[in-house]
Amino acid sequence: MSRLIVVSNRVNPPSDQGEESVGGLAMALAAALREYSGLWFGWSGKTTPEFTGQLNIQTAGGVTSATVDLEEIDLDEYYNGYANKTLWPLFHYRIDLAAFDRAFGEGYGRVNRRFAQTLAPLIEPGDVIWVHDYHLIPLARELRSLGVKNRIGFFLHIPWPAHQVMINLPRHRQLVEAMFDYDLVGFQTAEFQQAFEEYVLSEADGVLVSPGRLKGFGRLLEVGAFPIGLDAAAFAGMLETAKARRMHDLMTACTVFRHLIVGVDRLDYSKGLEERFVGFERFLTQNPDLRREVLMLQIAPVSRESVEAYQEIRTRLDALSGRINGEFADVDWAPFRYVNKNYRRDELAGIYRAARVGVVTPLRDGMNLVAKEFVAAQDPADPGVLVLSRFAGAARQMKQALLVNPNSPEEVADALKRALTMEKAERIDRWEALFEGVTREDVTAWRDNFVAALTGPRALQRPALVR
Ligand code: ADQ
């Protein structure tokens, strides 16, 4: 393999200045790109009055990136439209929030075409291309139509929905058929892979030729589950930084004689924040004796603010958090702190470390890296307890967490009580098993497994394909 080309909607390689605020995924991809002297291609985050395909090529932190600007209408139709108003809600089972608008589909197709036209001239024989996420599902199809024969893999970071949910999407067959232009399609969990296979079996005369080899639309495709991991060692290492220590000390000082319960999520309706708030309220109602012993901190930076559903959920969360404090706070004490700010990764590590309970209760989630971050940051001698939704991809790997149905305030309230009153020996046993998994199945393992599957002997030989 000569080079690895990573394609994602946004490109965010680590800068030369310092890497603490860059996410683990960006770090892992950057490391792979350095190893394979690769290229990271995607949208610059900027708009232009007219699309020109002009590339901005830069090298920073040892990684070369090539970005293009998009038109305002592209953002409306492709990014805010088809990606965030159609696919995101649908794939997270929020059919009620999914907007089906023909213009969105057209914009999505147009941007994928523009990406392919801009990227194709940069591809050399032997390069391996790794495409990320739901924004770019048809990219391989567009590249193939331009004559690109290289190996191309796709990884879906979000859930693949059940067949009956998927068929709500207009022209769903067209979208799935385009996935057969990849050599390998990866999902976060075996469950999502199975849901995809089921779709192909029932909608595309599919046949499961052998485990991980799927025939559909008269073609062959390799599929697999590649659960994403955390940059666990680097994340745990951040606890030693001055910023992490300061944050840890600050949180410890705020919770003298009290236990900290922490939640950290992008403000998104898939993250189950309303249900979590109600679960915490239920806990306070049912446990007057424990009330003054806890502080719940929810960090939820706003995201996708131009999408209406996000504005609405923000308003509802503001009201709910106000209601909880209004109902339970006293002159010297309030049970709930709700913060809409972004924090650096090292600061987050310090906050997790100070918490007795990490509460991660999405209604649906491809994986959820916060669950893994919480575990990586704990004190081995006195670890906190993870309360985790059954519907996060992470629940498949993290069975020693307290698994809950996030839709049930009772289950959330009971799990909070159980976590807060759990004996130290049990906390240590559970945490050790979780930490071992988080460290072993880390982001490097994820990346290496995917790249090996895409480039290894089992990967499809394109000329031999039934096409
Ligand atoms: P996301 O939906 O963004 O990702 P998640 O996996 O939880 O969800 O990752 C969020 C990241 O953002 C974490 O690293 C977290 O620390 C960070 N973050 C959250 N709040 C923050 C704050 N206030 N300040 C700073 N950082 C904050 C999608 C899928 C997931 C999947 C990932 C990776 O939806 O299911 O796990 O991709 O594949």
Image (cartoon, helix red, strand yellow):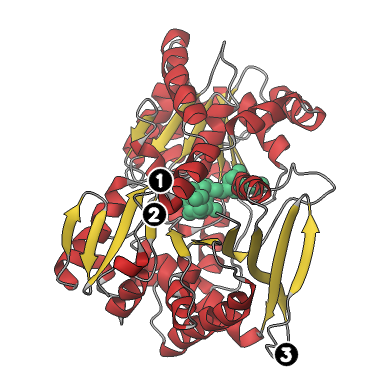
- Which residue appears at 17% of the width and 66% of the height? 206
The correct choice, above or below, for 361 with respect to 69 in the image is above
Residue 186 numbered tag: 2
158 to the left or right of 56: left
Say which quadrant the C terminus sits in: bottom left
Of all residues, the one furthest to the top in this rendering is 425
Q: Residue 145 at what x, y percent from top left?
A: 44, 83
Question: Disc 3 marks which amino acid?
Answer: Pro
The answer to whether residue 72 is above or below residue 123 is below
Residue 291, position as x, y percentages in the image: 51, 26
Q: Amino acid at mark 1?
A: Phe
Could you say where residue 91 lies in the image, as x and y percent from the top left? 37, 63
Viewer-side residue, 329 vs 208: 208
Q: Are marks 3 and 1 in contact (CB under 8 Å)?
A: no
Type of amino acid under label 2: Gly
**Residue at the spot of label 3:** 49
Assess whether mark 1 and mark 2 are in contact (beta carbons under 8 angstroms).
Answer: yes
Residue located beneath label 1 in the image: 226
Element at label 2: strand
Q: CA distance from mark 2 to mark 1?
A: 6 Å
Residue 429 appears in the picture as rendered: yes
